[in-house]
Amino acid sequence: MTMTEDDFRTYVAAFNAADFDGFGRFYADDVVFELGSRKRIVGRDDILAFYRKVRAHLDEHIDLRGVLVGPRHVAMYCRTVFTTLVDWPDYEFGATVKGDVREVETIAWYDLDKGGQRFTHIRGGRFKP
């Protein structure tokens, strides 16, 4: 059974809730995550470690604007709001201080495994800073 739009919305809801087990179950063990040319992470555990660090400093909320689900891919258009919870002077995407709010728009492409249930490759490109 392949992923449905409802499944993907469940993934986004778990991500927004910082439910690491909930959204992490959508990642294949060897998933590759790329944020344009700025960041590349390989492996479910390393992606979750990255997000744990991010969520210790920032609230990240995805506002899903559009999603297309196919048998082997998902495409998403979203607006993401980052709210800084604690100062993070050495954040790799730019220093930020408590209370800062940043918004970006992103197009993301998700490759699905042969069963159509878990992400094997995620590519995101921000086009509106």
Image (tube, grey):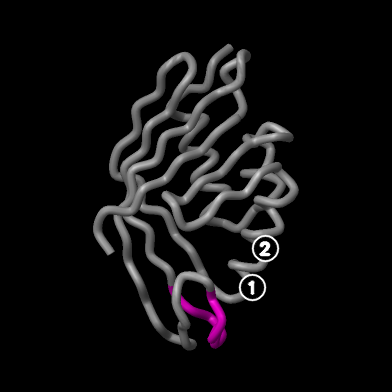
Front residue of this view, candidates 1 and 77: 77
Residue at 44 percent of width and 60 percent of height: 61
Q: Quadrant of the N terminus?
A: top right
What stretch of residues is rendered in magenta?
A: 83-91
Question: Residue 66 falls in which quadrant of the image?
Answer: top left
Q: What secondary structure characterizes most of the magenta part? A: loop
In the rendered image, the vertical position of residue 17 relative to residue 121, given as above or below: below
Residue at 52 percent of width and 30 percent of height: 7
Toward the front, the furthest residue is 37
Q: Which mark is residue 102?
A: none
Question: Residue 89 falls in which quadrant of the image?
Answer: bottom right
Residue 87 within the segment the image draws in magenta:
yes
- Circle 1 — which element? helix
Q: Which mark is residue 52?
A: 2
Q: Is residue 86 left or right of residue 21?
A: left
Q: Which mark is residue 56?
A: 1
Report x, y in % for residue 37: 44, 52
In the rendered image, the vertical position of residue 117 relative to residue 123, given as above or below: above
In the rendered image, the vertical position of residue 105 relative to residue 74, given as above or below: below
Report x, y in % for residue 121: 55, 33
- Circle 2 — which element? helix
Residue at 31 percent of width and 42 percent of height: 77
In the rendered image, the vertical position of residue 58 relative to residue 30, given as above or below: below
Report x, y in % for residue 104: 32, 61
Q: Are marks 2 and 1 in contact (CB under 8 Å)?
A: yes
Q: What amino acid is found at the position of numbered circle 2 in the picture? A: Arg
Q: Quadrant of the C terminus?
A: bottom left
